[in-house]
Image (cartoon, rainbow, N blue to C red):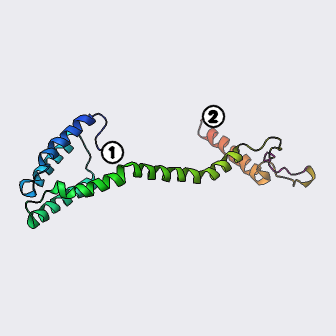
Amino acid sequence: EAQYVPSYHSVEEFATALRAVGEPMRGKPVSELSVGQMLDGLFAITRDFDMQTQPHLLLLQKTMVMVEGIATQLDPEINMWETAAPFVRAWVRDELGPEAAISDRIRTDTETLLRIPDLIRRIEDRFPPKGGAPEAAPLPKVDLMWQRKRRKRGPGLAGQILTFLAGGAAVIGTHALGWWG
């Protein structure tokens, strides 16, 4: 569901691999645990299942190493699973439980309701009420005949003279070079 693993890998195999790393540690005191071995197993899973490195998972693993070190110094016989259980249960309830689902649904529905006025405006713009005259089509501005100014057509007298001279020079040049008759 979290899409940590590409779709061509089996979710069941991924879950089994995670259990193989985590379950041997369950219920043991910190003095018998090695977060280093667990991390080695997790990195092997990452490689075997073609997972991309997730920064938040690296931070979680770093935190686990820190917790193991501190717990070992404070009480080597502490059971991390029992100590963390109330916090994990609260997190699961708050993030994945029915209250979280209801909260997510309320948030989503509220966002949907807030979009309704804009949706109605766009529908009304697209489909005007029946019976109303349609808006006039935009027409280009056309000058009336008596308002038109006399426009010059063609290149003008100077342009015509230059064109005639250039053409004459081309004919004389081709004749002088022997290209033409």
Marked residue nearer the N-terminal end (1 or 2): 1
Task: Looking at the picture, tell me which residue is in the foreground, 168 or 109.
Answer: 109
Residue at image x 15%, y 41%?
20
Left or right: residue 91 versus residue 108 is: left
Q: Position of residue 142 (x, y in %)?
A: 84, 49
Q: Is residue 70 above or below residue 24?
A: below
Residue 167 visible in the current orientation: yes
Left or right: residue 173 versus residue 85 is: right
Residue bearing the label numbered 1 = 2
Amino acid carrying mark 1 in the image: Ala
Count of labels in the image: 2
Residue at image x 31%, y 36%?
7
| Residue 180: image tag | 2
Task: Looking at the picture, tell me which residue is in the foreground, 44 or 88.
Answer: 88
In the displayed orientation, state which residue is furthest to the right: 146
Residues in magenta, as a range? 136-144
